[in-house]
Image (cartoon, grey):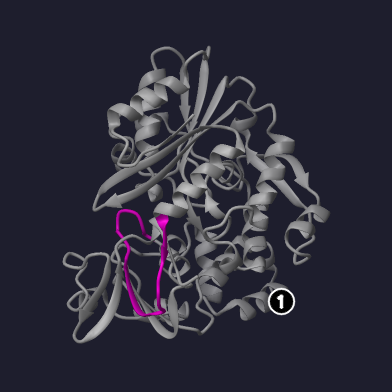
Amino acid sequence: MFIKSETVISDAELREYLKKSLEGKSLKKVLLLPPDYTRMYSGAGKITAYYYEMLKDTCEVDVMPALGTHVPMTEEECETFFLGKIPFERLSEHNWRTDVVKIGEVPGSFVSEVSDGLVDTPIDVEVNKRIMDPSYDLIISAGQVVPHEVVGMANYSKNIFVGCGGSSMINSSHMLGAFYGMERIMGRDFSPVRRVFDYAQDNFLKDVPLLYVLTVTTNTGDVTNLHGLYIGNRRELFEMAVAHSQEKNLNHMDRPLKKVVVYLDPREFKSTWLGNKAVYRTRMAIADGGELIILAPGVKMFGEDAENDRLIRKYGYVGRENILRLVKENADLQENQSVAAHLIHGSSDGRFKITYCTELLTEDEVRGAAFDYVPYAEIVKKYDPTKLTDGFHTVDGEEIFYISNPALGLWTRD
């Protein structure tokens, strides 16, 4: 089933489409796999809430957010994200280090083939053990298709192999994308990472009763606009969603941007691990010698868990070549390659200046991670997110380009 709206899909229409997706199914036990609160504009929280309402009185329903490496949701975030319709105690927590089982291996020869010979090591396929539990009649994975720095276009099987995946797959896939190069991946289908996920799904998830519910969205302030809904498990549906997202979420600039100001909503972005979407999604549009100013009032840490945070503080965003050298020299980076990939992604490689503006990290902490620093309270006197709108502005005689939410787009000169 697919719905591509010329306007916006209403809540009433959404309910009917979701209800239709369950027709003819005899269900006793269902697992819902939404994203977490960091995907607040995906529409997937509402979709999960509606499914929960439809199913809870007739079958057993488990809910496990696809956290990946992220911090677990708080009770307040659960209340907001799921519209108050899913009790917090119904949520199961995915632990990417301990809750997984290996279900197969992507051969090194295949990895080499899809990466043009850049990587040739086999990749263990690990998923949360619940996904392989045969007692589930249906597993519903909901998420937004949108440009992404590791896989090219999120969602689809990424929600399983990263969101509900284990350390081996997360580390290997992130480093594969970093070796291949973000600029060759973002906003595109059939990246090396996506092809690894396709191989894993085709070979190791054939007997899992997966139903993907994929969205294409934009936002107007706090309002999520649902433009597309693609329900099923055929890859063709994902490809249709990719094409739709490319229409809605790719922004082609006619000239390089000299100064970009990006706002990170404190409800969604509390770490540079997430906040560096400001870097990933704008880097292809920023001019050499330009500047990226990141307004980050809620950013209080670097990594989403203690070990990742420690490693980011230790090595910093020091550029691709330096990180590749450091990986060869340091066992802790070799064992946490998703961090190494993140450090590569979060650097401009000296091409443009990155200034983080927060007050929940000290200036020494920010500069220690190889970013420039301005206190948030000082910078907003000049660039006030309550007054700026998306697009070009002239501030004190200087042209800037303002972005209110980097998570929903990709800005490029290509």
Out of 402 and 204, give the one closest to the viewer.
402
Residue drawn at x 33%, y 40% is 81
Image location (x, y in percent) of residue 56: 40, 18
The quadrant holding residue 331 is bottom right
Q: Report helix, strand or loop for mark 1.
A: helix
Number of numbered discs overlaid on the protein picture: 1
Specify whether 217 is left or right of 116: left
Badge 1, how many Cα within 10 Å: few under 14, some, many 20+? few
Image location (x, y in percent) of residue 132: 65, 30
Image location (x, y in percent) of residue 117: 78, 65
Vertical arrangement, residue 22 with respect to residue 389, above or below: above
Out of 73 and 278, give the one closest to the viewer.
278
Task: Say whether residue 86 is visible.
Answer: no
The quadrant holding residue 320 is bottom right
Examine the structure image and report whether residue 47 is included in the region drawn in magenta. no
Specify whether 135 is left or right of 254: right
Determine which residue is flagged by label 1. Answer: 329
Examine the structure image and report whether residue 263 is included in the region drawn in magenta. yes
Out of 132 and 48, give the one closest to the viewer.
48
Task: Say whether residue 35 is visible.
Answer: yes
Specify whether 77 is left or right of 315: left
The quadrant holding residue 13 is top left
Please state which amino acid type lies under the numbered disc 1.
Glu
Vertical arrangement, residue 296 with respect to residue 86, above or below: below
> What is the magenta range?
249-270
